[in-house]
Image (cartoon, helix red, strand yellow):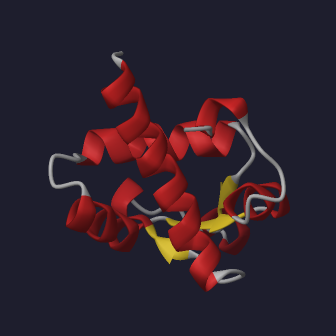
Amino acid sequence: MSDPEATIYKQILLFVLDCLNRVYPSPLQVRTLYRVVIGLFNNYSKSLMNKDIAFLKQKGYIEYVDSKIDSDPEFMDKCVGLTAKGKEIAMRIQTDPALEI
């Protein structure tokens, strides 16, 4: 991945965290989050959203809240929310070298 591509990728991940931080502690539906992201990054795809959500979830920054209410919706209908660790990253209290620009 070239430097400009890496920078854009990091900007998208930080933007997703920022969007979730704005509504914290409420979650957002992945579909809504996707629509907001493509407003700024129009080449963004649903498959990239799937990968980015998986990455942020594996890092412990977000979680699916649907599992807490015993449902199993399709990916775009799932709801995600920030974890406490994710809020610290979104607010720049903590840093993650993988997300530094």
Q: Residue at 48% of width from left, 40% of height from top?
A: 10
Number of marks in the rendered image: 0
Q: Residue at 74% of width from left, 54% of height from top?
A: 89
Q: Nearer the viewer, residue 57 or 42?
A: 42
Q: Which of 37 and 49 is in front in this view?
A: 37
Is the residue 55 above or below the residue 74 in the image? Answer: above
What percent of the width, then of the height, locates residue 57?
64, 45
Q: Residue at 29% of width from left, 39% of height from top?
A: 47
If the image is split into quadrants, where does the N terminus sit?
A: top left
Q: Which of 90 and 33 is in front in this view?
A: 90
What percent of the width, then of the height, locates residue 14?
54, 53
What percent of the width, then of the height, locates residue 58?
67, 37
Is the residue 39 above or below the residue 95 in the image? Answer: below
What percent of the width, then of the height, locates residue 76?
35, 61
If the image is split into quadrants, where does the C terminus sit?
A: top right
Q: Is residue 71 left or right of residue 93?
A: left
Q: In this view, does 38 lie to the left or right of 55?
A: left
Is the residue 69 above or below the residue 14 in the image? Answer: below
Q: Which of the 4 quarters of the picture holds residue 77?
A: bottom left
Q: Residue at 72% of width from left, 69% of height from top?
A: 68
Outermost residue toward the left in this view:
43
Q: Nearer the viewer, residue 99 or 69?
A: 99
